[in-house]
Structures are given as C-alpha cells and as structure tokens.
Image (cartoon, helix red, strand yellow):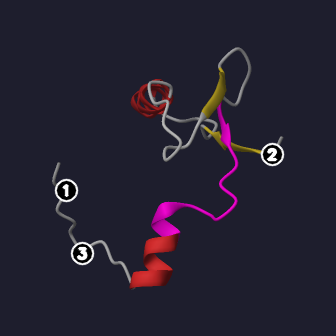
C-alpha cells in the first residue's frame, strides 16, 4: 500500500500543532470514495505525522492549477 505522509515541522507553534491535529480530525470524519482517506496519525513521536492514502494523480489544487490555470483569485461557487 502506498501512502502519503504530512509532517508537522519541528519547532511549530502550539497553534500550528492544534491546527495540524484538527486537520487530521476533520479528515478522519470522511468516508467517501471522492475524499482522501486518513490511514492514521502518529502523535507519540516527533515529528507528528498524518498518514493518508497516496493520491496517484496528485493533489486537487495541482490539478486545478495545471488544467484550468487556477489562481488564488479564482473563486468557486458551490451549490447543493
């Protein structure tokens, strides 16, 4: 199984640490084939790591930037 690992930089502030762990918590709430799957979180050693499934086709933001010349100024409207 291929995985991707995101690490919290050494010396990160407490706010960055909490934001990192919040991100992992939010990711863990999704069970949808269209959303990246959280495999686990390593918190008992440093650096703290988020382990997710590997995105074979790359990240969504990279895809949008390459395919549609996406820039931060471009805004999307989401409807349900």
SS of the residue at dot 1? Answer: loop
- Determine the CA span between mark 3 and mark 2: 32 Å
Which residue is identified by label 3? 74
- Determine the CA span between mark 1 and mark 2: 31 Å
Q: Start and end of the magenta stretch?
A: 49-62
SS of the residue at dot 2? Answer: loop
Q: Is residue 26 above or below residue 33?
A: above
| Label pair 3/2, CB-CB below 8 angstroms | no
Among numbered discs 1 and 2, the one appearing first in the sequence:
2
SS of the residue at dot 3? Answer: loop
Furthest residue in direction top, as rendered: 44
Q: Is residue 77 above or below residue 31?
A: below
Q: Is residue 62 above or below residue 5?
A: below
Residue placed at 68% from the left, 42% from the top?
Answer: 53
- Residue 61: mark: none
Residue 54 falls left or right of residue 24: right
Which residue is identified by label 2? 2
Residue 62 falls left or right of residue 18: right
- Determine the CA span between mark 3 and mark 1: 13 Å
Front tag of 3 and 1: 1
Residue placed at 47% from the left, 82% from the top?
Answer: 67
Camera-nearest residue between 2 and 13 = 2
| Label pair 3/1, CB-CB below 8 angstroms | no
Q: Is residue 48 above or below residue 43?
A: below
Which residue is identified by label 1? 78
Q: Position of residue 14 (x, y in %)?
A: 44, 26
Q: Position of residue 10 (x, y in %)?
A: 64, 37
Any magenta on residue 23?
Answer: no
Residue 11 falls left or right of residue 79: right
Residue 57 falls left or right of residue 73: right
Q: Position of residue 74 (x, y in %)?
A: 24, 75
Residue placed at 46% from the left, 23% from the top?
Answer: 25
């Amino acid at each position: 199984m291929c995985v991707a690992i995101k690490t919290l930089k050494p010396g990160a502030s407490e706010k960055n640490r909490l934001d990192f762990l919040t991100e992992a918590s939010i990711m863990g709430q999704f069970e949808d084939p269209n959303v990246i799957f959280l495999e686990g979180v390593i918190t008992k050693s440093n650096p703290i790591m988020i382990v997710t499934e590997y995105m074979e086709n790359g990240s969504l933001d990279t895809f949008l930037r390459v395919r549609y010349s996406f820039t931060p100024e471009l805004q999307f409207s989401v409807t349900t």
